[in-house]
Amino acid sequence: MADASYPEDLLYHPEHDWAKIEGDVATFGVTWFAQDALGEVVYFDPPEVGTTVTKDEPYAEVESVKAVSDVFAPLSGEIIEVNTSLGDTPETINSDPYGDGWMVKVKLSDVSETDVLMDQATYLESLS
Amino acid sequence: MTVSEFARIPMQDDEATTIFEKGAPGRRAFVAPPLDVPQVDGLIPDKFARATAPRLPEASEPEIVRHYVRLSRRNFDLDSGFYPLGSCTMKHNPRLHERVTALPGHAKLHPFQDPARSQGALELMYNLERALGEVSGLPHVSLQPSAGSHGELAGVLLTRAYHEDRGQHRTTVLTPDTSHGTNPATVTMAGYKVVKVGTNPDGGVDVEDLKAKADENVACLMLTNPNTLGVFDPNIEEIASIVHGVGATLYYDGANLNAIMGISRPGDMGFDIVHFNLHKSFTQPHGGGGPGSGPIAVSDRIEPYLPVPVIERVESGNGAGPTFDLIEDDERRPKSIGKLRGFQGNYGCFVRSYAYIRSLGAEGLKDASETAVLNANYLLAKLQQAGVAEYLPLAFGKLCMHEFVLSGAPMKKELGIKTLDLAKRLLDHGYHPPTVYFPLLVDEALLIEPTETETRETLDGFAEAIVAILKEAKDDPSIAQSAPYSTPVRRLDEAGAAKNPVIRQPLG
């Protein structure tokens, strides 16, 4: 497992999720802190493409050696792509949470929701 | 010692042969006597009969004995050492119970035996029901459920039957976020939706959150009191009145009953349904197999829906003693939820639990609970001394009931070892680790329940082992990170086991 890191170009949600915004599409995943707290991830239960997700509501489940946990949507919209490779290699969520461990891509329904998410500095402060 | 020195400690036994790999063709431990009745062919239709014989182990009696004795020595059990597994109440199983359970009248009783010829067993079960009714403050008992989770399912099905009988179709069940994992699983099995209720800063139910979520859709609130944080909820009367106020039932998860026997009763707190874990509070051996038993006790309003059969005591009226019967006909039990399993439940558990209750008596049960709480608080005080508390602080409150939760978060941050590493290193000190990573709301949780049957010396020894592990981690965290060293197998690949479970032994 890599060392703790929190990229500067992401937005962060208090439930330890990140969102990378590109126009009106966002990529979601969980932060280094979340994967470290979960422990080794053994299963990712993905949502289906076309599903509507709502900010602050669960959209997927991850199972680690410790527990099954909900993954919360940092923003609202419709899922346009799911990282299907996590089905075979869910441990990528641990080894590369911001890269190959991404979970879904979402077409945002309200880009202004990004205003309430945290930037890197604020998120780091919330962790300390 | 360094890691490499530990690694040189020889394994006790690293042979992993299964019984299928033992023995030789034709070898056997038993020879059936010659057939002395006429042989009957064709009892099993050809389409159901095997074409070839199954491959079964073929081993001599000494091979079989040695195989299973070797396996039992690789196991860690309550008879080998301290087993403070939180929420599991791993208390000593008195040997008297084994003696009475082995009496032929108990051990050889056939489940199809006619009630007229199993009066003693029915009387024992009836008396056990009354005793459990007294402990819980809820008079009507069914002994049928075979595990705590089975008792929970029975309780939620009773709730459903109760509401539907009144023409109400409720949809949700409330559970606190500290609840046992079986609670939400039970709710889902019974066809309800789980709604989580939050925890207040003292570790009890967040009453405001409960008020906000309690409405006419709620069928039930499932609660453990004391809860998995080892905290007794002082607001229980208000909680009961909120739940009853919306017409829902209040369910008591009896997993933590060991803290309150003879002191307070769920029925008096306002609960409608409670399950008991006879394999926890009432000494049925558990942890590594053996049958469990999860009887339920209910209030008057839930009684009509109890599973069948129910045991009825009939006074003779002629000076002879009472007789006991099993009632299950629709006419007399029209609203019953039906049978939960075959026969009456795990009878051996009933004999042990009844022996326990009768050996201790009312005062003895109370004493057991008081000592359980005292032992937990003694160990807690030992572990909150300087040198430990800064790494493993108590998660909630100051005192505890029969168990307590420490957080390993500072230990992980300051010393670089996780709760899992501490747990694994405890094995090298000869202790079974406490429950880890539960309850989920405590970061790096360590849930410790010593029970009343452990001595002060054992509790001291356990506390000293934790002190030693923390001290060792200050010098070299890699020792705990790679533990255990002295067990038959080293650290297990938990992720691999979850992802690629091998659950069938290949034959040959």
Image (tube, coloured by chain):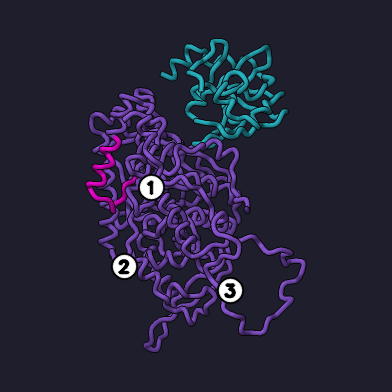
**First in residue order: circle 3 vs circle 1:** 1
Q: What secondary structure is found at the residue carrying circle 2?
A: helix
**Horizontal and vertical percent position of residue B411:** 35, 27
Q: Secondary structure at mark 1?
A: loop
Q: Are marks 3 and 2 in contact (CB under 8 Å)?
A: no
Which mark, by number, is residue B329?
Answer: 3
Is residue B155 or residue A69 the one in the foreground? A69
The magenta region covers: B449-466
Name the front one of labels 3 and 2. 2
> The chain shown in cyan is which?
A
In the image, which lettered chain appears purple? B
The amino acid on which the numbered mark 3 sits, given as a three-letter code, is Asp
* Residue on which disc 1 sits: B225
Number of marks in picture: 3
Please determine whether, in this image, residue A105 is positioned above or below residue B491: above
Is disc 1 on the same chain as disc 2? yes
Q: Amino acid at mark 1?
A: Asn
Mark-to-mark CA distance, 3 and 2 = 32 Å
Magenta segment's dominant SS is: helix
